[in-house]
Amino acid sequence: MTIDLGLMLAGMLAVGFLCQWLAWRVKLPAIVFLLIAGLLLGPVSGVLNPDQLLGKLLFPLVSLAVALILFEGSLTLRFAELHDIGSAVRGLVSYGALAALGLLALAAHVIAEVTWPIALLFGALTCVTGPTVIVPMLRTLRPNAKIANTLRWEGIVIDPLGALFAVLIFEAVVSHQEGHTIGVFLATIASGAVVGSVAAWLLGVALRRGLIPEYLQNYGVLATVLLAFVAANTLTHESGLLTVTIMGIALGNMRSVHIDDILDFKENLTTLLVSLLFVLLAARLPWPLPGHLLWQGLAIFAVAQLLIRPLTVAIASFGSALDWRERALIGWVAPRGIVAASVSALFALRLQELGVPGADALVPLVFIIIIGTVILQSATARPLARWLGVAEPEPRGVLIYGADTVAREIGKALHEAGVRVMLADDDYDGLRRARMAGLATFYGSPASPLAERHLDLSGIGRLLAMTVHRERNTLACVHYREEFGRDKVYRLRVLAPEENTERAALTNKLLAPPLFADDMTHARLIDLLERGWQIKSTLLTASFDWSQFLAQHGAESLLLFSVEDKGVLHVASAKRKLEPKVGWTAIALVAPAASA
């Protein structure tokens, strides 16, 4: 039966969305569900045959999709941030990555008996972890801050660097296979670097000078990336992937070029491309895998998991501030992701065309590593972290969306009470004042794709949406009610209940309860603080309980939070009236006469 191309593409989009949604619900990397869906649609059921469906369009479409994925990943590498990532991360993404590359290549060559060119490509592709698989795993793993930061930064930095490793090795393999001299290989590398740098510079100038209107910037960047990719391949064969990788790194490190909106667009586009690409590529896998290839892949996976990763982590983290327990957990967690799967499939297509021996084994071996690391580590990392004593307890910290006076004062009060606090906003001046007060900050919306990569939520389990923008508060509440739970998300009213429209009031009630009291608004809280009201923290005792606090500070005092002696935070809201007990710390808003 012949299936219409449009119907099949629409169906793949729907399947990709369902896989991404399922991954979001169960907090696992989407790549696992996408690969399983591709296997079920392709070799298992025979519904999807990519080669028959797309024909000669398959290679160009995969090439363009991978080019955009590599460009988006390269945009996130900021050289200015490398100074602050710590010696362990620097070791993991430099000589640690090279050691892993070599050992993985050796394992593939010895166990699977593939040629050295294919083995080196396998090593370059599988030494890479990425934020798209690390971040979902960290949410369920919940290790201590040192481990979380090390794993998160390793994924962020090694993602584009690993792509660069893989592209360079691929260029060398292709150049050798086509009988080119070392001069031709170097010319290919030089061409890709020059075209990528020039394209990034021209695009950066256009963005910096406002030559492209804001509503066309994403379109312009997309067109420029694809044009640079095709132009580089036309100028020097196979230099396009290096071009877009260099282009992303160069553009991401240009000064005075605002790329946050572009990065958001590229991340959303990458989600779409990855969903289509992984289903398509998994559908091309032979099934069942040849017995020898399956067992060889599993053996390589066992060596990578039990020997190579712990060894490279031990080497890279030697002399760092990590203790042996933290190194042990980091040595266990190294899921592979987007770069390995997408780039390996593209490389395999090209190498099979060139007749490189063993090219057909590259994708199955890489996919076995991907599925094995994600499934095994997702299932075992949390129990291992608990056994090693490096898991965070139940997250009790607070993410505050906002950085104005109200957010800073509440953040300071919670911080002084021993609660972990993170302020997130795009108000640079407000965040600067918060940092001066000793509070942790994140520049940007906590519901943005950028926050998915860079916002450290270790130890944090509640959201207080406190900006003056009702729509932004709503978006943050929607985003985090699944992350933290519906009972851990709160909002500070922007409008009084009588000022809310019926539709807005209904929406707000469904999202999150109002903070502190039903009639408390952001404007009223600002007014009280400006009139001299203060946020006061008091440890309640048998001789000075809550009733005596009210007697001393006034019955009009408003209880905001209470913190148990074990550090458990309780938040006052319109739906929850607190009754602080002896031994708890009460955080309340008190009148000026009472606080004097």
Image: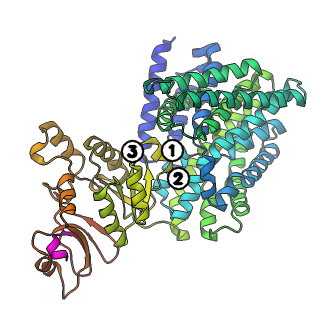
User: Which of marks 1 and 2 precedes in the sequence?
Assistant: 1
**Which of the 4 quarters of the picture holds residue 360?**
top right
- Asked if residue 129 shows in the view, the reply is no
Q: What amino acid is labelled 1 in the image? A: Pro
Q: CA distance from mark 2 to mark 1?
A: 9 Å
Q: CA distance from mark 3 to mark 2?
A: 24 Å
The local secondary structure at tag 1 comes to: loop
Name the residue rendered at 43%, 27% in the picture. 14
Residue 110 coordinates in the image, percent (x, y): 82, 46
Residue 447: which disc?
Answer: 3
Residue 378: which disc?
Answer: 2
Name the residue rendered at 89%, 29% in the picture. 183
In the image: residue 191, left or right of residue 552: right
Residue 547 coordinates in the image, percent (x, y): 12, 79
Residue 304 lies in the magenta stretch:
no
Of 20 and 543, nearer the camera is 543
User: Which of marks 2 and 3 precedes in the sequence?
Assistant: 2
Name the residue rendered at 68%, 49% in the picture. 301
Of 118 and 198, nearer the camera is 198
Which residues are the magenta region? Answer: 589-596
Residue 384: which disc?
Answer: none
CB contact under 8 Å: marks 3 and 1: no
Q: Dot 3, how many residues are within 10 Å of its Cα: few (below 14), some (14-19), or many (20+)?
A: some
**To which residue does mark 1 refer?**
29
Of 165 and 263, nearer the camera is 263
Residue 129 coordinates in the image, percent (x, y): 62, 47
Q: Nearer the viewer, mark 2 or mark 1?
A: 1
